[in-house]
Image: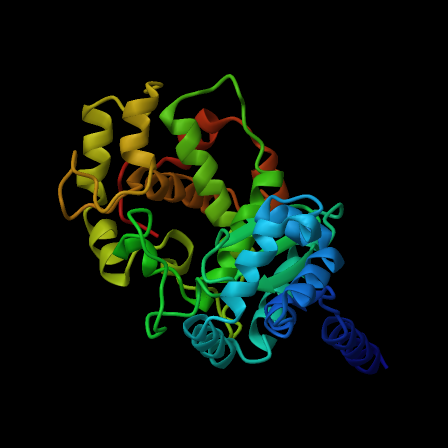
Amino acid sequence: MRLRIALAGLFCLFLLASCTKNEDITLIRLDQQLFSAKSADGVRTFLNQNPSVVQLYFNANGAGNDTALVRELTNRINNPALNELHKQVEAEFGDMADLRKQLGEAFTKIKKDFPDFRSPKIATIVTGFAGPDLVVTDSLIVIGIDYFAGPNAKYRPRGPEFPQYVLRRYQKEYIAPAVVFAISDKYNATNRRDQTMLADMVYYGKGYVFTKSMVAGSDGEPIADSLLIGYSDKQLTETFNAQDIVWGHFIENQLLYQTNPAIKQRYLNERPFTAEIGQGCPGAIGRWVGWRIVGRYHDEHSGVSIAELMRNSDARQIFEQSGYKGQKDN
């Protein structure tokens, strides 16, 4: 009888686990709607039907009456080159099933740890890079999927703000991690009075740990670290192996408690490499070190939940209790 009861209990647990429902994802293919508009009147109707997206993405209120925007979008959607790009984007993304699943699973996990979370609506759009790559708010996410068409796309964003190390991340696999990292900011408590480099490093580290715990790959396994921080696999390996040198640089130059914005930017901002350490050291190295600190803290304090970690605004406490000193242990 006891065995039967135990088996029944296991069966019930299995049913409960298998019946866990992912958050519903509202994904609106505005790219398809826009390219179906064709005429100026069609574009005007499209803009008037999607005022919240238009305001967020184009920063335009009453956009249906914005003759310059209507004219610009009409010209773009009738441009043969942009139509070719749109077809490439369609082929790359298909029905968006993978992205829906990945974000649905991530939103479900976020909701479990943060009950106040409400899944935002998601809209995809293609404009020939007329707007930003990604905009995330509590209620709406707009993804410029033309940016994420991948390295084989005929047209890619151009300009000094799109160096190769940035272009490398413009692939569809990077979308879900970027979305969830942006969402993490809402739950990432900080002490505004603490303007040290360490505080910024820990902020990024908490965001990466949050994202890694919420986003799974298409195979259900944890996503690759490269999709979080944007380093190549080679950069990740070399940086991990040289972290004692990186850490030594931070300590010798007393960088952890540095508050000078210009100095902090050298280690926290996007750059092709961190020249102060060497050409083999990737840019934004301070973010990576912050990730190591927070990751080690979270590993060492297994009883600390993600929600508790994110609520902890004491960067110095997290650092000191992490025990991190540039060591390579995982």
Identify the residue at horizontal 63%, vertical 75% (top origin): 36
Displayed quadrant of residue 109: bottom right
Displayed quadrant of residue 112: bottom right
Number of numbered tags placed on the structure image: 0
Picture coordinates of residue 243, whole percent (x, y) = 23, 44
Q: Quadrant of the N terminus?
A: bottom right
Whether 12 is drawn above or below 66: the answer is: below
Q: Is residue 62 left or right of residue 328?
A: right
Whether 179 is drawn above or below 85: the answer is: above
Picture coordinates of residue 53, whole percent (x, y) = 66, 53
Q: Is residue 168 left or right of residue 48?
A: left
Identify the residue at horizontal 50%, vertical 65% (top origin): 76
Picture coordinates of residue 295, whole percent (x, y) = 43, 46
Displayed quadrant of residue 74: bottom right
In front here: 57 or 202? 57
In front here: 258 or 272? 272
In front here: 85 or 202? 85
Whether residue 290 appears in this view of the structure is: yes
